[in-house]
Image (cartoon, rainbow, N blue to C red):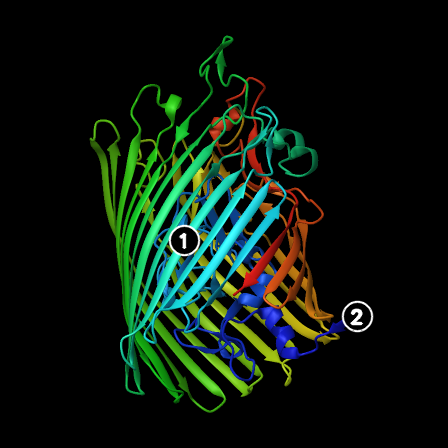
Amino acid sequence: MRFYAITSPAISIALLLGAGVAHADDSIVVTARGREEAEIGVPDTIAVYGPAAIAAQRLKTIDDFIAATPGIFMIHDQDPGTNLISVRGISTNRSQSPSIAYIVDGLALPDSELFTLRPYDLARVEILKGPQGALFGRSASGGAIAMTTNDPGPDWGGEAAVGIGNGLTWTADGVVNAPVSDQVQLRLSGSYRNSDGFIRNSFLDKKVDGSISRNLRLKAKVALNETATFRFRLGWANEEGGAAYISSGNVTGLYGGRLSGAALTNPFGDFEGRASRTWWGAQASYEQEAGDALLFTWTGGYDDYHKDFVEELDFRNDKPLTFFGVPAFPDGIQPIAQPVDIKAWTSETRLTSRGDGPLRWHVGLFYQRLERDRTDDFGPLLFGGEAFRAETRSSQVGIFGQASYDITPQVEATLALRYDRDRRKEDTVGTVSGITVAQRARTFEKWQPKLSIAWRPTDHLTAYVTGAIGFKAGGFNPLPGPADVWQAVFPAETTRSIEAGVKGESADGRIRLSLAGFVTDYDNFQNTVFLGNSVVLSVPEVDVHGIEASAQAALGAGFSLDGGLAWTHSRTGTYFTPNPTPEPGEPAILDMSGQRTPNAPDWTVNGGLGWQGAAGPAIVNVRLSVAYVSRVDFEIDNILHSPGYTSVDGRVGVSHGAWTFDIWAKNLLDKRWAISAFGQQQLPLLLGLGPNGPFDSFTINTGRQFGASATVRF
């Protein structure tokens, strides 16, 4: 059998960038600024993934997309809904609003619990870095993720895929596109995954991270007339499986907080954590063309979400906390339950100019109502007392607009402005008595401007400067006592950023390059600490600056190369905080100035080499990817940390006619690292629990994953 290289630069670049939409000249098209435009002309740093790139890199979860993108980092642990995303050093702590907006089919998700629902049947994913509040509102202080699912099309067809992998993992995905008539089109898609897991609990002698994921989505597109279109989407997801498979050990005392090598033990607790969650949502949109000049769009949606989650807090199999040989908790500190319920209503109305004239603009109105209930039932730690439920209600209104004007044929100025008003209220209610023990309310509001100047001397080169402001609303702490140092309400975060960059491509499109530098003033970073309660203490200032670069090249002979790197310096300014675990001889106040912000590595680097060619009648695609993450500090004291690590992924795909067969591997070299940690110096519970002394808790990664899949299109 002979192999032949496929040398089309358009195909090679499509595999590198995977644009879901392309112009006739093969330029990558994005919708980040509310209209379709070439990515090379947008004055922002944007990572774009279309169907080709999603398949080539086997991007199956939001974790995968973030891991493939320099400058952004994610922790996804504890349970299916808990996640922390950091963008360019703008970090997020637990039990807080995210620092990144997540938009699906044009509508912002109301809560980070929904961020980790399994994505499938995707048309395009865009990841924007830097404050995007002017475009997407509060919680876009670090950036935004915009995900677009495939619309129904005019032709009958679909595809089905099945896969198998280690950990007794098997998957099934399917899509059916059904045009009912010339005016009505339907699309039904689904995704299923079942895995026994990869992480073994050495005490229970079983894998404890197994999971089942079930997902369905129905979309409808109705052409009401030649100028009006109605779309509807109904989705459902259910997941269940292991949770809080947390290891423990005295990493601080024995290894100086370095989570690597022998410190990375498997979990050995005597309680198996479990979680289950169910989501369903509906979304509708109406689009009306008003001649050649205007486009009116309304989008509305509803989300309903419930999660059950139980775990232990000692993560051991001995008797924690003994008094004169008598265990205080003979059955361990378990079960600990933290159920979450979310209901949200979201609506956005937008009026957009049409055409390619020198002035392009849009204005809009946004509304979101969020009802979120979370119960913290600490079981035996309550000593017979009742648990309490935090009932949070949020009403957000946003008014926004953007205008771009071509000052000359080569120079574009863009001004965007958004006002957000977020009214938040939280009641703390006894789960048994129904008595309200605390009530708080606060309004957070902010004007968020964004100004960009872009110079395009040719169609293949753009240089730009962008300045933007973003903010994340504040929230509520437990009510403080007379001696407590925290406030009942913590303030909003604010980011002010300036970015300068250049994007270019060769005339034939075979080479694409980008370079950007940024400086961000980051005020009131919301840092979670444990002072008898889990509370937020604001870090007044964080210094953030960095650079990013990316390159893609079609090398010829079927080979393609892509890579990107991001360096981010994110350090606290002057900051003094109470010592959460004061011991004899230790100061009551700690100086945390100049510390690395949690979950924000200095370096993230990605690269990939691909080849596409013909083997007889078949098409072969091969890709090898490498990713590097530098040191990650999990808490503001910078003690518990994961040193830098490298992972290697690979895929070989063979396509013939309607069929595609893949073999793939993630973390091919089976490297192990910690993905999250809680330290004994930050959590008093861990300092005094075990009879064998203090310990730290951490979660390890799953190790190598590999498998094969088959896909047929019809």
Q: Is residue 261 above or below residue 32?
A: above
Residue 13, position as x, y percentages in the image: 62, 74
Q: How many marks?
A: 2
Residue 166, position as x, y percentages in the image: 63, 43
Dot 1: element: strand
From the image, tell me which residue sits under label 2: 2
- CA separation in Å, label 2 and label 1: 42 Å
Which residue is painted at 37% across and 86% down in the image? 355
Residue 66 sits in quarter: bottom right
Tell whether label 1 touches label 2 (CB within 8 Å): no
Q: Is residue 590 above or below residue 573?
A: above
| Badge 2 or badge 1: first in the primary sequence | 2
Does residue 597 appear left or right of residue 336 in this picture? Answer: right
Which residue is painted at 48% across and 57% down in the image? 174
From the image, tell me which residue sits under label 1: 216
Residue 246 sits in quarter: top right
- Residue 105 visible from this viewpoint: no
Does residue 628 appear left or right of residue 381 in this picture? Answer: right
Q: Nearer the viewer, residue 603 or 532?
A: 603
Q: Nearer the viewer, residue 352 or 324?
A: 352
Q: Nearer the viewer, residue 148 or 357?
A: 148
The amino acid on which the numbered mark 2 sits, given as a three-letter code, is Arg
The amino acid on which the numbered mark 1 sits, given as a three-letter code, is Leu
- Outermost residue toward the right in this view: 1
Number of the front mark, 2 or 1 = 2
Badge 2 crowding class, 10 Å Cα cut-off, few under 14, some 14 to 19, many 20 or more, is few
